[in-house]
Image (cartoon, rainbow, N blue to C red):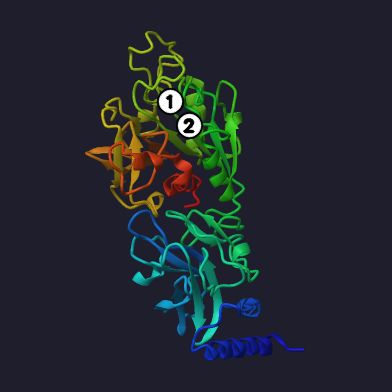
Amino acid sequence: MFNSTLRRGFVLLASVSLALSSCGRTPASAAPNLSALAAAGEPVINELYYDSPSTDVGTFIELRGPAGLSLSGYTLAAFDTAGTQYRTITLSGTIPASGYFVVAQDTTVPSRTLVNAGADLNNGAGSVRLLKSAAIIDAVAYGSPTSNRGEGTSAPTTGAGSALARVPDGSDTNANSVDFKVQVSTPGAANGGGTTGGGGATGKKVLFDLTKAEDAGNADWRIDGAYSDYANALRALGYTVSSVTGTSITSTSLSGASVLVIPEPQNPFSDAERAAIQSFVQNGGGLFMITDHRVSDRNGSGWDSPEVFDGWDGSTPASVSSTYQASLNSDVTFGLNASFNSSFSDPVLTATPLTTHPILSGVSSAGVYVGTSVDVLSGTALMGTGGKTYLAVNSVGTGRVVMWGDSSTFEDNTLSDGSTGTYNNWPNLSNAAMGKNIVRWLAKDL
């Protein structure tokens, strides 16, 4: 019986032999068995983010391995769909204390360890190998390459804006189709299904409000309706997702939650509800306010979502009980105001980043269809256009708040005022990296 040291050496020699027999490339039929090397403390390819929306920016390759391990002598080799090597990335430095080594295409990637433009891999299908001299340490194939240089059946392709990641974090069964899932990118943090860090099996609860007729009229902002994909995407990141039902939000209904999402409310909040939500945020909760344009009254109550967030405008509806006049009072309470000077006359807008922020990781632009701009009285404007802000954040007490100016969004750099192509790319926040990043930031996992 081999001891662990001898076994490791045997696998290394076998890997070298395979590489030499094919002039430096292992045949696709000879998928390497890497479990012994992984057990011996070698790193694995943990996450690939190779296809960002439009022109690729912010792509990366993440390794997971023992903290302090020197990567001198290690390289990453990228292969196209035919199995031809088109790129080599020489690694250097050591794996940080976090255990994640992030090779970033550019400096926009958070938690980056090494910057190398070669981290922008082929979209669609291909393979990546981690090599130590001539020995194959790990291998991943994605899509349907005609020559699979990964382990077992290839992992799925991602599509623009999503990453391919080991779930649970760091797992390695030597079968790419089993180990890798499509998820929101998490550079330098645990992947969905992991046990620690951002995006893992967090044990955190995200609540979507349904107490304010968010599903009235032609709206359907329910987690079993128009936001079902959004809810499923968040569940895939390890969150528990449910709705607040009934007619009011209370401290009891918010108990145990990490994030509250209020999507286009149609009825006002009472003073008691506002106090409960304010206390929730002050004590560490995250609040995501999603508004829409003025005159978007879906249930005939006289209220539209900007007015619900900011308070009665004194005219519509004609009269309001003093208990509801302030409604959420978001400008005073949270420093973010859904502007009554909306973008109603501009049906399709392209909002672009105004600064750098974790929420904007992998996001180059977002579409707003007849939304409302945000007045930032306290906090940071993240995205906008034409002098208007459509995404803003703030910290209140120990909690965080976000306001977005539309109940839908899409990410696409080819937006063109109302073209067919634009509307085909007009899903909900569930299909946008930004929507997932917002919840992760509010939950303090990003």
* Mark 1 → mark 2, Cα distance in angstroms: 11 Å
**Does residue 158 lie above or below 205 as drawn?**
below
Q: Residue at x 64, y 78 (%)?
A: 33
Q: Amino acid at mark 1?
A: Leu
Tell me if label 1 and label 2 are in contact, CB under 8 Å.
yes
- Residue 261 place in picture, x, y as percent: 49, 35
- In which image quadrant can residue 80 be found? bottom left
Pointer 2 residue: 262
Q: If you read the primary sequence from the N terminus, does the residue marked by circle 1 or circle 2 appear first?
A: 2
Q: Quadrant of the N terminus?
A: bottom right
- Residue 142 place in picture, x, y as percent: 52, 65
Q: Is residue 183 left or right of residue 308?
A: right
Element assignment for label 1 = loop
- Residue 217 place in picture, x, y as percent: 48, 21
Pointer 1 residue: 328
**Does residue 371 lie above or below 161 as drawn?**
above
Q: Residue at x 48, y 76 (%)?
A: 83
Element assignment for label 2 = strand
Q: Is residue 399 visible?
A: no
